[in-house]
Amino acid sequence: MGIRTDIVTAERLVFSEDADLVVVPGVEGEMAILPHHAPLMTMLQPGEVRIKMGAEEYYLAVSGGFLEVKPQRVTILADAAERADEIDVARAEAAKRRAEERLTGRAAEVNNVAAEAALHRALARLKVAQKRRQRRL
Ligand code: ATP
């Protein structure tokens, strides 16, 4: 019996399966969650979620959000989340370029926090999409 793992946004249920292992981008670093984990709540940063189910491994990008762990259940509430196969690489590359321009350009001081967050979302999407490509080889 695995740990029921739901990844939810305001718009949709992105993922809902019994997992053997869930690795999430906690604000203080990666966290690995196995079934029967002690209850906890914490914030996530933009990054990659890895989910092992038997021999399969799934990759998703999350934009940050909220993690709740109970012994039989993991819930991630995210502003945005995409499975690897849903990620539009060209869009993420364009978002990365825009964020980098905002961070290095003359308007750098205007909205660094938002640009840095956008950059991290784009990098997380590109990393996860890259995993999908590797798996196809
Ligand atoms: P962009 O500037 O390209 O809109 P963003 O980081 O500002 O990127 P978000 O606000 O995080 O986008 O997400 C808005 C919606 O678009 C969400 O539903 C998210 O899942 C989706 N989304 C964003 N970027 C991508 C992408 N590269 N591929 C697929 N879906 C994406």
Image (cartoon, rainbow, N blue to C red):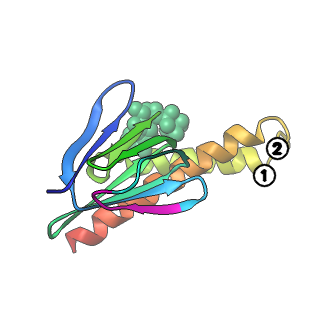
Q: Is residue 31 magenta?
A: yes
Residue type at tag 2? Ala
Query: Secondary structure under badge 1?
Result: helix
Please provide the residue range marked out in magenta.
Answer: 30-36
Residue at the spot x=27%, y=33% of the render?
Answer: 13
The answer to whether marks 2 and 1 mark residues whose Cβ atoms lie closer than 8 Å is yes
| Residue 108, label in figure | 2
Q: Residue furthest top?
A: 11
| In the image: residue 42, left or right of residue 82 | right
Amino acid residing under circle 1:
Thr
Which class describes the residues within 10 Å of circle 2: few (<14), some (14-19), or many (20+)?
Answer: some
Q: Quadrant of the N terminus?
A: bottom left
Label 1: few (<14), some or many (≥20) within 10 Å?
A: few
Q: Quadrant of residue 130?
A: bottom left
Residue 21 horizontal/vertical position (percent):
29, 62
Q: Is residue 122 left or right of residue 89?
A: right
Quadrant where the image shows the C terminus: bottom left
Q: Which mark is residue 104?
A: 1
Q: Position of residue 87 (x, y in %)?
A: 35, 47
Please, is residue 50 above or below residue 65 in the view? below
Which one is nearer the viewer's eye here, 123 or 27?
27
On the rendering, which quadrant does ligand 1 occupy?
Answer: top left
